[in-house]
Amino acid sequence: MARGRRSEVSGIDEVRARFEQWRQNRQGKARIPDELWSAAVEVARRNGCNRTAAALHLDGGKLRKQMLTAGAVAKKPVPPAFLELIPPQASGVAEYTIELQGRGGTLRIHCKGATPMALAELSRALWSTGS
């Protein structure tokens, strides 16, 4: 684990040194060269945009734009057009008890393996014949 962390740090340090050298040698307000932006984008892919921008003394918004241009980050996640919800499979046979109360008394139905819709239809049929 320490090895991976060290390589990330050395990557940031190397790119930071390149930026510092460029800043010391640039003429006036020259734009950051594409090679440096590419290096910054690569570091940002591994370490995150904000962390990299702070380490390299860059504007986080500009670094993010460079990452978008390079295709390193998707613009916005596209919401799914359709989402199917699949109920979990029952591990055994479904068992139901339905209790109906009315003026004429109580009707209790206990079934195994019937669907709730079938039970609802059965209870309606039985209840309506009793009225």
Image (tube, rainbow, N blue to C red):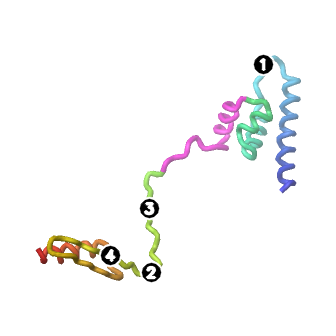
Locate residue 106 relative to residue 84 in the image: left or right.
left
Check residue 38 for magenta coloring.
no
Residue 92 is tagged as: 2
Say few, some or many: other residues with alpha carbon within 10 Å of mark 4 (under 14 / 14 to 19 / 20 or more).
few
Q: Position of residue 68 (x, y in %)?
A: 64, 38
Say few, some or many: other residues with alpha carbon within 10 Å of mark 3 (under 14 / 14 to 19 / 20 or more).
few
The residue that label 1 is drawn on is: 29
Locate residue 86 relative to residue 18 in the image: left or right.
left
Whether residues under marks 4 and 2 lie with C-beta atoms below 8 angstroms apart, the answer is no
Q: Quadrant of residue 13?
A: top right
* Mark 4 or mark 2: whose residue is earlier in sequence: 2
Question: What span is in magenta?
Answer: 59-79
* Mark 1 or mark 4: whose residue is earlier in sequence: 1
The CA span between labels 4 and 2 is 13 Å
Instruction: Name the residue at 67% across, 36% down.
Output: 64
The CA span between labels 1 and 2 is 73 Å
Q: Position of residue 17 (x, y in %)?
A: 88, 34
